[in-house]
Image (cartoon, coloured by chain):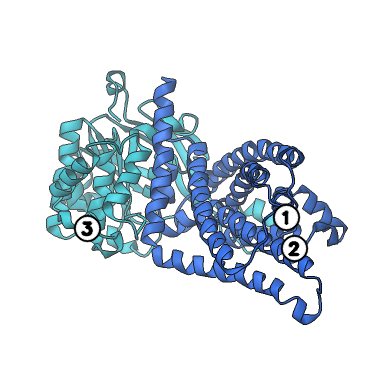
Chain colours: A blue, B cyan
Amino acid sequence: MIGNTLRWELNAFTGFIERQKNLYRRYWAWEAVWLLYNLVSVLSIGYLASGLSTIGLESGQASLQQAQLYLLVGALLWTYLSMVFFEIAFAITWERWEGTIEYTFMAPIRRVTHLLGMCAASLIYGIARAALIGLALVFLFKLDLSHANYWAALAIFAAATLPLLGLGIFTSILPLLSPEKGEQMAFAVQGVLLLISGVYYPITVLPGPLHLAGILSPLTYTLDGVRQSLLHGLSLTGALPDVAILLVMGVILVPASVWCFGRAEVRAKRLGLLKRSG
Amino acid sequence: MAIRVSELNTPAVEIDGISKRFGQPGRVRRLMPWRTVKPPKLALDQVCLHVDTGRITGILGANGSGKSTLIRILATLLTPDAGTASVFGYDVVTQAAEVRRHINRVSVEASFFKEMSPWENMLYAARLYGGGGEGTRARVEAMLERLGLPLDTLDKPMKQLSRGQQQKVAIARSFLTSPSLLLMDEPTTGLDPRSKREVQDLVRSIRRDRAATVLLCTHDLQEAEVLCDRVVVIDHGRVLAEGTPAELIRIHAGPDGRSLEDAFMRLTGKRLEEDEEEKEE
């Protein structure tokens, strides 16, 4: 019985990944445009760092390379994190656009399967796109990664997955609560995360309340930990505190976000919001 | 999902005193007093309904009469404010997961990922209903062939298909999951006469071959007359009458009336077409 249920849910889980793959393939022109946009954004940050010396802000060559690496790691990671976040957060909005929301919500599957299926598809997609941009960076910039500890970076990157999914699921609730304004609110959340998580600067430069918010953001630990690993060769042992914090955040955020999603679904059913026009 | 033997003796649908009102002005006004709110609308008013297993039951009503609200409650997409509803004995609110295993729905607007092909959309649907393995493609092809849809449309984006073709794919998608209860909300709207007849034949065959129950919301009185075993007339959220088409005509069509349309007009005091512009809540 449990085996059958698990098989049923796994089949549906696969269905979401398969569906997203088909959608990415069918919307290939849009995907190419977004990839180009992301690439250009990251390159702009890279060239901004290259140009720092010419505008008199930095003189030492070694420091300049460090600054460039600092910003490029931030830009690349943000591209990945925001992409995954966006894909999960817009899972509901997307279905409303397409008009399929009712069919997905009346399917005989657990909501957690639906959400994790979307998360898995988003992660695969985010990693693939970020890898392409990363390759372009390696070709275009002389990056000094001689001190990098890739294992530590990978451990932090992997641990960051859970809280990232939690944040994405939390944000995907917004279009369920407000079909008209939820989408814009999701963009606002993404903007706040960019501001407080130390993507392009250490969070110590932020004023008090924003600094505090930055400490609570899992993305802060992801960015800081990966940077420390790639720029300063942070050891695997040294990365453990960040990994632990991220895992704890993930263990709290994922179940909490799924539970909140369930409550939001109950509300949407009461108010009649589970339909294409909202 | 096939119904169990024990469920054959259970009514497919049992609705007891369901009410649904949209809009909560008190709550909204309290939280945001500056907002203008629409007046609340009573979509269903203490509706009671009993649908036997293996029958085609038609729900006749004008736009805004509450048909779609009723269907959405049975589809577990909407919770009633009062009353209870069950599908094969499972409560639509407290046992929604069980209900979902038994139902599928065809709505008036074909709802698909429009860039994806019919095959990709149907494979996705099959996966959500425990299918999608070997033989699915063959089943889909057989289904579409039966509905008169050219097989070369199977891999084209949905957006390239005509409205009628999209609706046929929607119907095939619902049949693919072998529902015990099929909720059809104006499924033949927008189809040409030939396609309409093909769909009607398929509805009959699904009832005959699979002992499935069909709840059919329709504007088409002729369709209701030829297809439905029983018909329920609904207006302003209330059930006005129910019975076989012959019974409704005999009792409600009046001395000169001979059709279901006559019965409907006398019951509601209007033609179905009169309030086409009213929107379903």
- Residue B164 image offset from top left, x and y in percent: 22, 59
Disc 2 target residue:
A66
Badge 2 and badge 3 in a common chain = no
Question: Which residue is located at x 52 percent, y 37 percent?
Answer: A112
Q: CA distance from mark 1 to mark 2?
A: 7 Å
Q: Residue furthest bottom?
A: A55
Which residue is label 1 attached to?
A231
Same chain for labels 1 and 2? Say yes or no.
yes
The residue to which callout 3 is attached is: B165
Describe the element under mark 1 as helix, strand or loop. helix
User: Of B232 and A174, which appears nearest the observer?
Assistant: A174
Percent position (x, y) of residue A129? 51, 58
Q: Amino acid at mark 3?
A: Gln
Where does residue A158 sit, x and y in percent of width and height? 61, 43
* Picture layout, residue A95 above or below residue B179: below
Disc 1 + disc 2, Cβ < 8 Å: yes
Mark 3, other Cα within 10 Å: few <14 / some 14–19 / many ≥20: many
